[in-house]
Image (cartoon, rainbow, N blue to C red):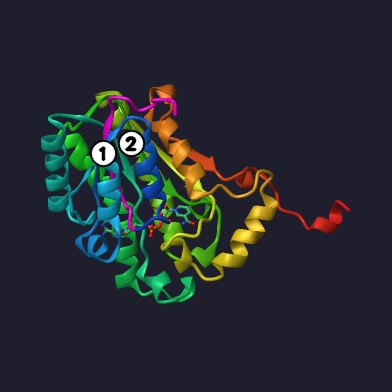
Amino acid sequence: MYNLLQGKRGIITGALNDMSIAWKVAQKAVAEGAEIVLTNTPVSIRLGTINRLAEETGSIVLPADATSVNDLESLVDGAMAHFGGKFDFVLHSIGMSPNIRKGIPYENLNYEYFHKTVDISAMSFHKLLQVLYQKDALRAGGSVVALTYIAGDRAMPGYGDMADAKAMLQSITRNFGVIMGRERQVRVNTVSQSPTLTTAGQGIAGMGSMIDYVDNVSPLGNASADDCADYILTLFSDLTRKVTMQNLYNDGGYSSILPYPNQILS
Ligand SMILES: NC(=O)c1ccc[n+]([C@@H]2O[C@H](COP(=O)([O-])OP(=O)(O)OC[C@H]3O[C@@H](n4cnc5c(N)ncnc54)[C@H](O)[C@@H]3O)[C@@H](O)[C@H]2O)c1
């Protein structure tokens, strides 16, 4: 323990069960001294195990569907009431594609589903930032982090419409990062995580063999959900005060390597 987040308070979205990246962030943030508010959709709260996490971390759970500005306003109001004022960090750990869930390939997308993918996985981040901005909810020196995947920067049609949603999420990070930086002294970044076996991760076709492949290619091997949480804590801490508007890879080096067949080396 480093007491990295002593005296800091924040909202953590997206903890569904103990595989969730957000679950690990919540546990580690509290271990580092933070006070947190957890949130998820009413249905995920019911079907998942977030209440167990709340008990373990001494936190409250405020339900909110991140596609609803009203819900997000209530969430931020509720968090400010709970903390007794402004807070320091927010994790956006939200993603879902009905097209992927139903196994619909990129060249045959259902556009109603595509709207949902973008609303849940990308536009929700703009909505969250806009509510945080309008309510002036974050303290100077604060930090907002969203989770993304390399398919947001490189072609990977197997990741379906989520690839487009992640590209949009990363763009929102840069654009809102300007406003949050200039006007509120708040950082906004994305962490681009290795493929990880979570409930969302398991939805991607061929995920198991893809994880093994990427693990082999990455010099340090794949980053786990625990590794991801450790990295996110540094971004919430005061040690990264000037890091903003970045897409930061937590992927064992995968994003910088040109994969080649093993036989070329042997
Ligand atoms: N697992 C991976 O391989 C991987 C890799 C890179 C990035 N990510 C990203 O990490 C983030 C967290 O995913 P995870 O892998 O921990 O899976 P997860 O399934 O545990 O978390 C996804 C969360 O999104 C929540 N969610 C869905 N719709 C919502 C809505 N309308 N409002 C609020 N919350 C909603 C779910 O309830 C769930 O808690 C996602 O953004 C995902 O795209 C995952």
Q: Position of residue 244 (x, y in %)?
A: 41, 30
Mark 1 and mark 2: Cα distance apart in space: 7 Å
- Residue 48 falls in which quadrant of the image? bottom left
Check disc 1 and report its element: helix, strand or loop.
strand
Residue 89 magenta: no
Question: Could you say which disc has been placed on residue 36 in the image?
Answer: 1
Provide the residue designation for mark 2: 30
* Figure check: 110 above or below 8: below
Q: Position of residue 213 (x, y in %)?
A: 66, 59
61 vs 1, nearest the viewer: 1
Left or right side of 98 for 254: right
Identity of the amino acid at label 2? Val
Instruction: Decide: few, some or many residues near mark 2? Use Cα within 10 Å; few <14, some 14-19, many ≥20.
Output: many
The outermost residue toward the right is 266
Q: Quadrant of the N terminus?
A: top left
Residue range (magenta): 1-16
Cβ of disc 2 within 8 Å of ligand 1?
no
